[in-house]
Image (cartoon, coloured by chain):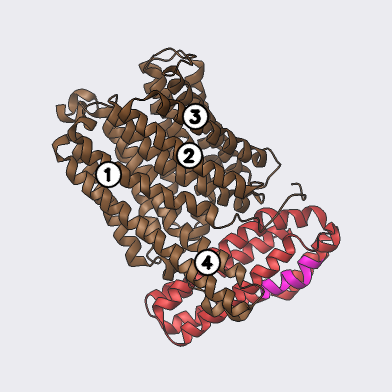
Chain colours: A red, B brown
Amino acid sequence: MSSIPEYMTVKHRECDDFFTEAESAVAKEDWLLANEQFQLFTKELFLHLAAEENILFPQFEQATGMTSGPTQVMRMEHEQMRGLIKDLTSELDNENKDQFLGLSETLMVMMQQHNMKEEMMLYPMAQQNIPSQETVLSEIKAHCE
Amino acid sequence: MKLTGLSFDALPPIDIPFRYFLTAPIFALLSAIIVLIYGEVIWMSRWHPTTILLTHSFTLGFITMVMMGALYQILPVVGGVGVSRVRFVGAICHALLFIGTFALMSHFVYQQYWLKVSAFIALGLCFCLYILAISLVLIKRLSQGDTIVGIRLAIAALFFTVCLGLLMLGRTIGVEFLSSSKSYTDIHMLWGLGWVSLLIISVSFQVVPMFHVAPNFPRWIMKLIPVGIFILLVSLLMLTPSSKVILTVAGGVLLLHCIYVWSLISILRQRKRKIPDTTIKFWQLAAYTIFVISGFSIVPIEFLPKYLTQKYSLLIGASFIYFFILSVLIGMLLKIMPFLSYTHLQQKCLMNFTAMEYLPNMHDFINKSQGNKLFVMHVVSGISLLVTIIFPYLYYIFSFALFVEFSWLFFLMLKTMNIYYKSAKKIQLASQ
């Protein structure tokens, strides 16, 4: 994983894996496994969101001069995801299958649409514009691992 | 990639795509009434005016209506840039498409000169404005290479479809640029199916992996299929129209669809998200339909019973439209309508997070059981369509099944809109 887009995309897929496992476990009402996978998912996702907000986005904003454009929208979507995760955690605690699956469908589509924008637009733009790629990537890796 | 003009939140106002979605089932319900009124005569020949009436009610009134509405929404997501002055363009094109389609359908029934002229003007203006507005977005340097390339080809296909359609309609009102060869109808039909297929295929490269957490389509599929279909369609304009040329091109287009759906099935099989999902069933139905149509079309005609050979092209065309195109569109509507409603409501909560308690989730809009019922209704009405083509005296069964299916779809749409507006009101009150 030699570039920012590659590394961040792999992280998106890891989050997807944990999330789909948790969702499948809820569908089968295996609450123990669902809890385990959902915790792994939230841990991975929160690390990823923080790496973007605290390391990648500021570098992007500095390099492009765009402080109120794409990164602002991404930050707002992060907040929306956090809100949904809070609700999902509460439904998981209550073992409410139908509510969880309704919310998980919502989060899944929102997350995929968000990831698509990042992978197809924001990350390539970051790669084009941020001068010290390797330093930023090392910082992100150190934060996430 | 250009940074200027890139907007990650250029979603059109929700009423723009929704006015198209909500109008579409009305034309499907009208189709059910047409089937009931005209009965057996519709199924005698594809050249009968009532058959053309029914075809346009579906292809313009339902299919094109849904796809035009969806494209306003798709462009900002896959390209990062939306249609400018979207409220104006969206509202005008919708009104013109509605009026034009209605006038065209009425012309097939009443054969009045003023209806033909009205249809010609309304549809001409509608598509000119729409194609221009979308093209202004597509000529920009956008992201998402293969999907955007496919959408560009789809819009070019729409342009040729509309030109041919208007020229054929124009012939009957004294604007004679085309001869009266029936081959032009076939070419118009193939370009029309091409516009829909190109858009479905290109958009699927994005939405199938996105909605179902599936791997991406292979690069060669994303590059070869849309361009291949388009080149075959262009050859129709280059070569002298004849039934042999048209059949060869149609065969080539079908072969490319087979390669595409083979890849689609493989992608769906590898999806990570395995929980039951009605949209997946619609995709699978669409994919297997292409295999069945291909299998049917390679059987030498002398091996087929007479009741099938008599309606050969009608059966293939109807299966393609009903089980391939409509299945994908309805399956996508089940996903898009709740998601759009949710996204717009959530944006209203950005300034006031406490209002998020009034946010419904995707299943509150349309739940799994309601989606499954729609799938069953679609399969039943599709089968009844094929049975009616073979045994036209059973037309009333198809009419009934069609009416039930699209009433249900219409109900689900209205329910979604109702929940949206109620929730929006609660969020607004909580924010005051």
Mark pair 4, 3: CA separation: 35 Å
B178 displayed left or right of B223: left
Mark pair 1, 4: CA separation: 32 Å
Q: Secondary structure at mark 4?
A: helix
Provide the chain ID for the residue under circle 4. Answer: B
Residue at the image point whose x is 66% and y is 51% from the top: B80
B243 in relation to B22, above or below:
above
Q: What is the x, y in percent for residue A50?
A: 71, 74
Q: Which residue is mark 4?
A: B342
- For the residues carrying marks 4 and 2, which lies nearer the camera in this image? 2
Q: Amino acid at mark 1?
A: Ala
Highlighted magenta segment, given as a residue range:
A47-58
Which label's residue is closer to the chain start, 1 or 4? 1
Q: Secondary structure at mark 1?
A: helix
Q: Amino acid at mark 3?
A: Val
- Image quadrant assignment for residue B146: top right
Q: Which residue is mark 1?
A: B32
Q: Which residue is mark 2?
A: B97
Which label's residue is closer to the chain start, 2 or 3? 2
